[in-house]
């Protein structure tokens, strides 16, 4: 599963923030939210779509309805690449943070070579072709960093996912439906059945006003 383990720096920030509001933007059906809540209860999930589980606030992450200086940690996992221009959200996210608050952006980065995440990388590309409205092609950390006007306050890292997915059934059902017309979907489904799905690496970016001085 993506983002397992979480960066130790994020675990430390969550610990430090315990009791203060923590928000996950783009929480979807709450997979990452549940993981965060095992460390700190009460993490608030926000998404554009009203999923039946995991959601506390239905809103656009680019203009989140959060009070200024109210949030201790803002986390987003595989959201940034879905946003048309994610950096448009930076001012709003920073404004919502307390003076010791931190912003966390986590993004899958399956290996670009034929490393352990190659199948997951191929799956992401295949889904982008098959479901155009899905948007959100993988974003490299280099592309993210190049888009920043300044790296002041930012730190970056990369983590090897350690846990295989435990919920491949729906994914395989979808791939099977396309397999008749899309050889790549058939190849990926067969490879997942044979070898499972290794998520490879993910990258993270952390911003804190404390680190800007
Ligand atoms: C790949 S899913 C990530 C789900 C979750 N963070 C996880 O890691 O399991 C991306 C989510 O971002 C949401 N999303 C896309 N654009 C958004 C926006 N502008 N504001 C809020 N959520 C958005 C989508 O609805 C989707 O649930």
Image (cartoon, rainbow, N blue to C red):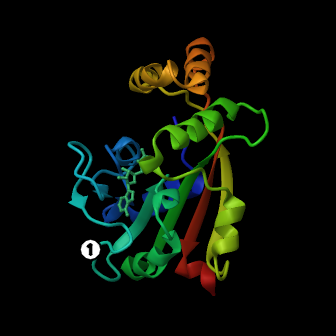
User: In screen coordinates, is 189 left or right of 40?
Assistant: right
Please indicate, yes or no, whether residue 131 appears anywhere in the rendered image: yes
Q: Residues within 10 Å of mark 1 (few under 14, many from 20)?
A: some
Question: Residue shown at 60%/50% (left/top)?
Answer: 138
Please indicate, yes or no, whether residue 4 appears anywhere in the rendered image: no
Percent position of residue 210, x then y: 56, 80
Question: Residue shown at 36%/52% (left/top)?
Answer: 27
The quarter of the picture where residue 57 lies is bottom left
The quarter of the picture where residue 161 lies is top right
* Between 16 and 164, the one nearer to me in the picture: 164
Kindly give the residue lying farthest to the front in the view shown.
Answer: 181
Kindly give the residue lying farthest to the bottom in the view shown.
Answer: 213
The quarter of the picture where residue 169 lies is top left
* Between 97 and 190, the one nearer to me in the picture: 190
* Between 16 and 186, the one nearer to me in the picture: 186
92 shown above or below 47: below
User: In screen coordinates, is 5 left or right of 140?
Assistant: left
Question: Residue shown at 36%/66% (left/top)?
Answer: 61
Q: Secondary structure at mark 1?
A: loop
Percent position of residue 32, x then y: 41, 45
173 shown above or below 144: above
Percent position of residue 154, x then y: 63, 72
Percent position of residue 141, x then y: 68, 59
104 shown above or below 88: above
Question: Residue shown at 23%/60% (left/top)?
Answer: 58
Quarter of the picture holding the C terminus: bottom right
Q: Which residue is mark 1?
A: 65
User: In screen coordinates, is 153 left or right of 89?
Assistant: right
83 shown above or below 101: above
For the image shown, how many numbered marks are present on the structure?
1
Kindly give the residue lying farthest to the right in the view shown.
Answer: 113
């Amino acid at each position: 599963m993506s983002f397992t383990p979480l960066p130790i720096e994020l675990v430390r920030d969550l610990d430090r923030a315990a009791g203060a509001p923590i928000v996950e933007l783009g929480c979807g059906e709450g997979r990452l939210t549940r993981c965060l809540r095992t460390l700190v209860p009460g993490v608030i999930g926000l998404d554009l779509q009203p999923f039946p589980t995991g959601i506390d606030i239905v809103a656009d992450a680019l203009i989140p309805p959060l009070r200024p200086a109210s949030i201790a940690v803002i986390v987003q996992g595989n959201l940034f690449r879905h946003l048309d221009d994610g950096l448009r959200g930076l001012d709003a996210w920073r404004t919502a943070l307390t003076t010791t608050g931190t912003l966390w952006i986590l993004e899958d980065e399956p290996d670009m070579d034929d490393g352990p995440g190659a199948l997951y990388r191929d799956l992401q590309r295949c889904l982008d072709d098959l479901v155009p409205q899905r948007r959100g092609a993988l974003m490299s950390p280099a592309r993210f960093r190049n888009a920043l006007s300044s790296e002041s306050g930012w730190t970056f890292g990369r983590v090897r996912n350690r846990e295989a997915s435990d919920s491949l059934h729906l994914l395989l059902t979808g791939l099977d439906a396309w397999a008749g017309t899309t050889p790549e979907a058939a190849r990926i489904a067969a490879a997942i059945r044979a070898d499972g799905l290794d998520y490879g690496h993910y990258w993270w970016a952390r911003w804190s006003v404390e680190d800007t001085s």
